[in-house]
Image: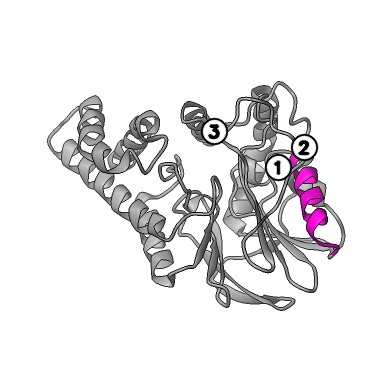
Amino acid sequence: MVKLFQCMSFFLFLSNACVSASTSPVSLKLTAIKVSDNVYSIVAPSYGRPTAENQGWNSNSHFIITGDGVLVVDTGSSESIGQAIKNAIQDVTEQPIRWVVNSHSHADHWLGNGAFKSSEVEFISSSLTLQTMAEDGPADVKAFQKMTQGITGESPLIYPTTMIDKSLKRQFGHEEVEFHLAQNGHSPGDIYLWLPNQRIVLGGDLLSTHYLPIMTPRGNVTNLIATLKKLEQLAPKSILTGHGEPAPKSAISRDIAFLTSVWKGVKTGLSQAERVESIVKRLQSSLGPQYRAEYQDFDSSIQYLVEMMVEKQQGV
């Protein structure tokens, strides 16, 4: 019951932080954006919880054309969105979809797996992600149905079968892919992909372009900062995110500095018995001039982020 509450509190946060590029319903005729000769992104135009207005489409998917088939990273919030993603891929290439990677267990990134179910498709994630999917999945399907007024439907729960539980390299056709664990920084068992030959990182929700770093009830702040520092050392040329447009390289350093400042500010406030409301106002005032222009949701989401960090430092 606690884990269900934690999961839903994250999606309620997304509701409060919602930033949309369009007020009209999102068309499920999706378009892939070319990142490199064989890497593409399908970028959702809205950020926030699934709604009837966005038809549940609130997260990004990416795919790699390998020569031996297509590798897909994240499949959206429902089977219907997954099918729309699949259609967008087939508009670009005739190669068959052979691999699906779920970057983490949040439902907006994997409930579309059902659209890709086939004996020819290998589903890949980490053991801890699988465990969390199994715990949260049934409730997430119902919650998404409610939030979208039934539009997302009864998406079947298709779980990963190949586990990535340590860093490893694997060849997919002509593309070498490195899988790395993200130390539960964003959520339990989250992973990211690194394409060393192209210097492209597919980071899931570890990174976003114009939104505050996404801290969740089961994420780990210090581990997220440590993971971002590892990504910074990779010096990627392209950063593909879970939400928003591909991020500039500077976004990694920005998020490290911001998270470090908020974490330190919360620790200082708690050591002086400062009230949470006061910590929020102080950090909003001190960090706003630098970060308000960087993060579209700075003012709407800073309170949630501070409250989350207070809970983590208090061990709640």
Amino acid type of disc 2?
Ser
Q: Residues within 10 Å of mark 2 (few under 14, many from 20)?
A: many
Nearest the eye: 102 or 199: 199
Q: Is residue 311 left or right of residue 162?
A: left
Q: Find the distance from the CA under tag 3 to the CA under tag 1.
A: 16 Å
Quadrant where the image shows the N terminus:
top right
Q: Could you tell me which residue is drawn at 58 percent across and 78 percent down? A: 197
Amino acid type of disc 3?
Gly
Nearest the eye: 171 or 312: 171
Q: Earlier in the sequence, mark 2 or mark 1?
A: 1
Kindly tell me whether residue 76 is visible in this rendering.
yes
Quadrant in the picture for residue 275: top left
Amino acid type of disc 1?
Leu
* Disc marking residue 48: 3
Q: Earlier in the sequence, mark 3 or mark 2?
A: 3
* Magenta run includes residue 83: yes
Q: Is residue 259 left or right of residue 203?
A: left
**Residue occupied by mark 1:** 111
SS at mark 1 in the image: helix
Prevailing secondary structure class for the magenta stretch in the rendered image: helix
Point out the stretch of residues depicted in magenta. Answer: 81-94
Q: Could you tell me which residue is drawn at 16 percent across and 30 percent down? A: 274
